[in-house]
Amino acid sequence: MIDRTIRLDRSWSWRSFFFQWEWLLVLIFIAINILNSFLSPYYLDVDTFVSMPMTFLDKAFIVLPMTMVIILGNIDISVGSTVALSAVVMAVSFNAGLPMPLALVLCLVVGSVCGLINGLLMTRFRELSSVIVTLSTMIIYRGIAYIILENQASGKFPTWYSTLGWGSVGGIPIMVIAFAVCAVVFGLLLHRTSFGRRIYAMGSNLTASRYSGVKTGSIIIIVSVLTGLMAGVTALFLSSRMGSTRPNVAQGYELDVIAMVVLGGVSTAGGKGRIGGPLLAIFIIGFLNYGLGLVNIQAQDLLIVVGLLLIVSVLVLNVGFLDRKKRPVSPTRGEKEIQEEDL
Amino acid sequence: MKRAATFSENFRELGLLVFIVILCAAFQIRNHNFLTLSNIRDLLADTAILGILSVGMMMVLLTAGIDLSIGATLALAGMVSALTVFAIPTISPALSLLEGIAIGVAAGALIGLLISRFNVLPIIATLGFMNILRGITYVVSGGAWVSSYQMSDGFKSLASGTVLGVRGLVLIAVVIFVIFAYFINHTRTGRQIYAVGSNAAAADISGIPRRRIILLVYVIMGALAGLAGVLWVAKFASAQGDTATGYELSVIAATVLGGVSISGGSGKVSGLILGTILLGILNNALPLINVSPFWQQAIQGVVILAAVLTNVIVKRNNQRIALRRRAI
Amino acid sequence: MREDLLKESTDVADRILELNHITKTFPGVTALDDVHFDLIQGEIHALIGENGAGKSTLIKVITGVYEPDSGQILLEGKPVRFHGPADSQRAGIAAIYQHVTCYPDLSVTENIFIGHEKVHPLTRKIDWRDLRQRAAELLERLDADFGPRTIMGNLSVAQQQIVEIAKALSTNARIIIMDEPTAPLTNRESEDLYRITESLRDKGASIIFISHRMEDMYRLATRVTVYRDARYVGTWPLAGKKREELIMAMVGREITQFFPKRSVTIGEEILSVRNLSRTGYFKDVSFSVHKGEILAITGLIGAGRTEVCEAIYGVTHPDSGEIALDGKPIQVTGPADSIRHGIGYLPEDRLRQGLVLQWELFRNVTLPTLGSFTTAGWLNTLREQAVTKELTEKLEVRASSVFDLAGTLSGGNQQKIIVAKLLAGTMKVIILDEPTKGVDVGAKTAIFRIMNDLAAQGYGIIMVSSEMPEVLGMSDRILVMKEGKVAAFLDTHTATQEQILSAAVPGSGAA
Amino acid sequence: MRREFSRIVRIVGFVAVALTVIGFMAACAKPVSKDYAIVFKNTGNPYGDKQMSGFKAGIEEQGFKAILQAPAQPTAEAQIQIIESLISQKVAAICIVGNDFDALQPVLTKAKTAGIKVFSLDSAVNPASRLTHVNQADSAKIGSTLVEAAFDMSGGAGDIAILSATSQASNQNLWIDYMKKDLQDPKYAKLNLVKIAYGDDIRDKSVSEAEGLLQSFPKLKVIIAPTTVGIAAAGKVLTDKKLQGKVFLTGLGLPSEMATYIENGACPYMFLWNPIDVGYLGAYTGTALVKGTITGAVGDKFKAGRLGDYTITKAADGGTEVLLGPPFKFDKTNIEDWKTVY
């Protein structure tokens, strides 16, 4: 008879260690830095490295919750509009006499409420796919922003507010610090708490999760609210950088964000991916954009480059050696799994 | 039970129809020029392109896919065909159409291969190609526009020309609707599209060429986008790099309004037509009834959401009724 | 008849299908290792073996879903190669698969004919009228109670099973493969299936019948082939072959006691259900479970057994009625609550509802009780793994490490993992819905033993099952359901199979 | 344990980032380029291309190097990023064609403190964030010219409508305000402005807006479209509906885009300045600012190559500006020569 003792370690191989998506991303990242520093003499510069992150980090705040959304197997394309709406409400309420600190809070609140609405729609009407729900709220949220502010811009913020998006502490931009904090928090949430574990469970097998007593509804709502909240944070930094706001800010942010998450190796089928990938992807795309901007590559060429980067990387992920499904997962792998894969 | 089911299947069409009638009535009361012949002709002409694209999008959605790249495909096809017309004014309109379609097919085939052969998720593949194709459009045009005077009248008449008082554009759309209605309802391949979307695993073991079907729908989508591109340029007599940016979302909205399920397998042409018309009416009527331009977007969004939600609610009601009917 | 078949079996000419030295390997696992199989014209041939023995792979090789790495397939003596299901269909081979493979959004007619519809030579238009007619005829032959226009998704599993058979018939297949066709069916439905199968055989079709149920095999087959661990064990005429011998051949060891006896003193009542109703599913269901008791709930598919359990577990919400635990009424808004109260549920469909197949064992085991493995939301992974090791070893799960993926285990072991999920928490009542469905003989006994141990530890156990032997062999009391209502309460010691059936089958018996 | 790996991987990733950054901290000071940059609204816009080519010509004939940049989408966010990269390149001057009046102030202020001469062109940014503004034409003048044209085409009386670009476009809104002011003039009493529609400079939207105008106001006499996309769309609609001679179109448009409609009479005449000259003037303003011959204060004078001498004047928005000249009138007589130019 075979022995019944069950080991507490997993079969470990250098292969499985190195063939991880994150490694490829690290390589791409280093490659891009080398490329940039060859292309432009201005790249290797302290000022550049202080100002560069600030040009793309505003979106990055949304990448964090979007990673959760996509691991859940959902998608949220209303984030751009949420940013616009919360920014507009903040600006208008401030100019209506609300003290700035409160206006900032309000901005976050509005963002969270937008997220909450998405969440409620998704849980109350589970038949609807998240694409449909967020597609319509995307139109509605921006629509409301237009109703509020029509063709005006609103701004005239107090001067201290601009330091949020422009200032730095000890040579490190406030934005970077803020983002680092958020990134750590979300990373821990996703990989070290029961909340994160349940997100993965739902992404991998929703039904089984329900039968295993995962409160799927509340998880979806919490994640949606988090998404809205971070959209609010983005709104804070964006309006601080622009010194004013309009209903048409942050257009198309949703696609940029999704692209980053996916480049980070998070499967839109749900259940797969880790926070590290998207984090690297943010800096890869950001540095690439900025570096090529330094050598005055035209915008249209940038479009092509980023598009290609996305396609090629996903191709490598699917076709290339990285594909986990093609590796025997454990010696006792039996017929059942083969069926699972082929059917 | 069965009756309830069939009712709920036809409900969407009925509901949409009622909804459209009510809307029209309301608009007509607000502005008496709404239901005039000339305005209806404008409406149809402006909705034709949306309709053509929504047919393709329907098939993509049936296989549980999605295509975000059509706006860019449209722009590229339009730009290239316009540039050719500019270079060779004598080229026949039919040829330009073919040229546009060819470009669309090429783009669609690339995307389709990525999705069917290399299992790239549709949303990703098309997201990437949205950027790539848009970029290429700017590159080929060198940032320039092709203007009305640089296009042959024959080319422009593709859209503006009328047959028996009907805009050529509209005719083409109608023809396409008829062809594809026949294709997906009455041919093997057509039904297999439904099958693949309904249960991919089953499709594999019952010998349906799943990958080929998926490739096919994206090629069709591309072809229609290419066609639409040429018509678009002909209609507005100007080709720009940023043509139809973000148009894919309106198309998806129209398709979903028409009752095509994003998760694949279900959706009808009849519903699709109504959905497209509904969206067309909104675009055409809101300016007409002097709704502040700043309210239009919100209103459109609310209408879309309302349409989708009512459908869900009614479906649930039917199920409840069906359960009551069950003898217990 | 069996005798002359026996003679013929030696005679190669009558072998309509023969597979020799077939080997099929997947990365990391050999699914078929130099196996043999032969099918005689006009016989029903049972293929048995534990899960993982290679049965399903063999079918996929025959139907061309897989191409074998080596070995030859002879169809009527001529070697053939199938490069896809389409080929095998053309050769007259049809398969009815284990997990019913239908198109829920399409009509029955399309489900039957998809891929080989009759089309107009020129217009390529599908001839719907003709198809509907033929579909109607086929359904007639199988005397189905639904029309060709019905949407597949609205049919019950048994009805879908019939459509699958109609599909096979529509191709005029000469060789029909049935992979576990009776698994989702009740005895009565199985009877219908037997009848249909035999009529097919009489019409000249040769049938490969795969099943875990010994009843099926003895009822239908003339010869049996046994596989074990991807290898060919042997082929025998069933006549005079004892079930114990076959089981030995399958599991490679003797299984002495099928339904282990036990001595448990039944304690006080833990769970009581009063007038539980859910519109359209079940009505006024009342019963109670005691400490150490195994209550069997049986009845036909669609009688509302699973629905009642799911309502108790909180997956669905009853319209009226009350559930009391230890005499105290409880409010259950979802599985989370019931788990907290100590009600555990082993769902019917373990692949969809029970496990996250691509997850490691320990993550599966701790999922329902994740809260108890966290301090302030913080996961203690090491404890998860320790607890998993302990439970899986106690349940004798056949796995190498707590990091194995649930999908890599055999059905029986997967079932044990789900049990482990329940044991990880502090349960009082455990509901097992078809615990032995699609589980091989070896694992069955193991599961029965576990059930007894649990009862002995004072758990109250509800077992939903369609299989008479295990209902009679395992339970203390039997609740028979019919059309959503309680049809009968029987004491196992006095109950007989006939009593149960007559109570369960609509029309007959008193409710 | 895979999570352990991933943690390692992540750490490695950020160590990589840190190292690169630190490495670059040590990097030596960089050369200061003497380049002149122009940032247009968005790429793929021929009007912008002409402006940039004019700017390029002006810069290069003075022996400097020009950087031409434009984002893919006409948004302030995108322009901010481009300007940031220009600051990193330490260019001599930035000539911005603003997508937003206020939103660029922070980044432009940063540029100014970095010693870069910042001025706006065509579409202004607020006075605080620019040294001066190169104005293609006097806004008040544009307003009055267009109203005058409408008066002339309508024969002095009737309904007129405006088809504008996006509801935010600062230029258009300014001009429209001036038109409204002019229409108060008793001379225009019989002209009544029935609606201002926004086509967002998107083809299909502009077309349906134009059709909407014609549907809801059958008595419409003149459409004023002070935007290149809008006017072309309107021209197309009038042509398709064979309304030449019944409804007249005027406004600001590209000769190339409008040639067809001016020739077929849908648009008797329209106005525009020469974008090449605008860019060219911008180039010389830039070099003058860098040389220090001007500071952007009212009264400063400088010579702008072939265009001759210019003086900086007070702008309506409170800042200062350089005025190119009166808008140029295009009609049947001259469109032939211009349609191929831009």
Image (tube, coloured by chain):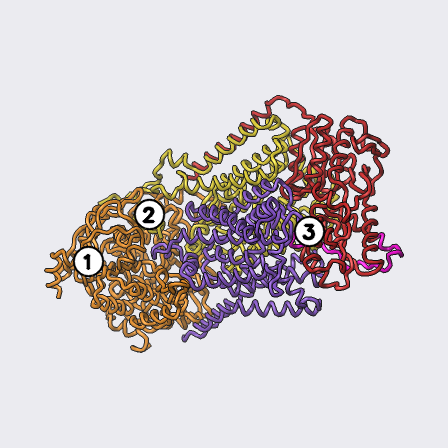
Look at the numbered disc 2 and give the secondary structure of its residue: helix
Determine if the magenta segment contains residue A295. no
Query: Which chain does the residue under circle 3 lie in?
Result: D
Asked if residue D188 is among those painted magenta in the image, a careful observer would answer yes
**Residue C408 got which mark?**
2
Query: Residue drawn 61% across and 64% down?
Result: B166
Three-letter residue code for mark 1: Ile
User: Residue furthest toward the front?
Assistant: B90
Q: Colour of chain B?
A: purple
In the picture of the structure, the residue carrying the numbered disc 3 is: D200
Q: Secondary structure at mark 1?
A: strand
Spatial distance from mark 2 to mark 3, Cα to Cα?
A: 57 Å
In the picture of the structure, the residue carrying the numbered disc 1 is C16
Kind of residue at disc 2? Thr
Please state the extent of the stretch shown in magenta in the rendering.
D181-206
**CB atoms of marks 2 and 3 within 8 Å:** no
Q: Is residue A36 left or right of residue C155?
A: right
The orange chain is C
Residue B124, position as x, y percentages in the image: 50, 46
Q: Which chain is yellow?
A: A
